[in-house]
Image (cartoon, coloured by chain):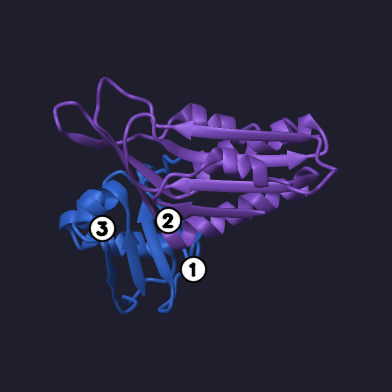
Chain colours: A blue, B purple
Amino acid sequence: MKLLYFAWFRERVGLAEETLDRPPGVVDVESLLGWLEARGGGHALALSDRAMVRVAVNHDYADLDTPVGADDEVALFPPVTGG
Amino acid sequence: MAAWTQPEDFDAAAVMDALGSGDTGVGAVCLFVGRVRDIDGGGGLTIEHYAAMTEKHMARLEDQARRRWDLRDCVIIHRHGRLRPSDNIVLVAVAAEHRRAAFEAAGFLMDRLKTEAPFWKREETPDGRAHWVTARSEDVESAARWDLGGGDP
């Protein structure tokens, strides 16, 4: 799966994007966030306040129980501030 | 009908002229432009966006507005990249038969654009530092009022 990071989430992770094989046990957004946080470092820092993290799967806003698969593009970012 | 992003400035007068051009059923045009405010003499801001998702959401918002109000034409433009105080950021223009639909659709589009489209502002302070702008609860409330049937035609 392809992961994209934006704004301060990107800065905390230290990467704009990464591609990875779907980790064992990762089936939805909640399990993906848990797996990313467990990697520690910038990922854990970026996910330390989950209320400030928004997730999109294939360009649509997702919930914790939205499924994620090997071919999906998942983006993580703060609440938007355009306009 | 169109919604897009661009780094360069836009010409609001040209958009106004082209909006609903040749359509004699248009009786109302509402055009909103958002500009960069000068905050404490800061140097400006940079807008980051998630291109693939942004244009999809802007098109979806336009579609929602068209289903809710009887619109004759609609243009949404949002800039990204480096902007300075007084620069244009966003344009929403709507043409309709009557003013109420034009005002309401433009308000709906701006409120939803601010809370749904994936743009992020990074503001520079006069001392050369920068911070990511925090989302405002007032903006979320403004966007939510359209859920409650507020502003329905």
Lower position in the chain sequence, tag 2 or tag 1: 2
Residue A23 position within the rendered picture, expressed as x and y whole percent measured from the top left = 31, 75
Q: Which mark is residue B101?
A: none
Q: Which residue is mark 3?
A: A37
Q: Nearer the viewer, mark 2 or mark 1?
A: 2
Tell me the subunit letter for badge 2. A
**Label 2 Cα neighbours within 10 Å, binned few <14 / some 14-19 / many ≥20:** many
Q: Is residue A1 visible?
A: yes
Q: Are marks 2 and 3 on the same chain?
A: yes
Q: Are marks 3 and 1 on the same chain?
A: yes
> What residue lies at 68% left-to-right and 41% top-to-bottom?
B94
Q: Is residue A47 visible?
A: no
Q: Amino acid at mark 1?
A: Pro
Q: Which residue is mark 2?
A: A55
Q: CA distance from mark 2 to mark 1?
A: 12 Å
**Label 3 Cα neighbours within 10 Å, binned few <14 / some 14-19 / many ≥20:** some
Residue B124 position within the rendered picture, expressed as x and y whole percent measured from the top left = 23, 33
Q: CA distance from mark 3 to mark 1?
A: 18 Å
Q: Secondary structure at mark 3?
A: helix
Q: CA distance from mark 2 to mark 3?
A: 14 Å
> What residue lies at 45% left-to-right and 70% top-to-bottom?
A68
Quarter in which the N terminus of chain B is drawn: bottom right
Q: Secondary structure at mark 2?
A: strand
Q: Is residue B15 above or below residue B148?
A: below
Disc count in the image? Answer: 3
Q: Nearer the viewer, mark 2 or mark 3?
A: 2
Quarter in which the C terminus of chain B is drawn: top right
Tell me the subunit letter for badge 3. A
Q: Which mark is residue A67?
A: 1
Lower position in the chain sequence, tag 3 or tag 1: 3
Q: Amino acid at mark 3?
A: Glu
> What residue lies at 48% left-to-right and 59% top-to-bottom?
B53
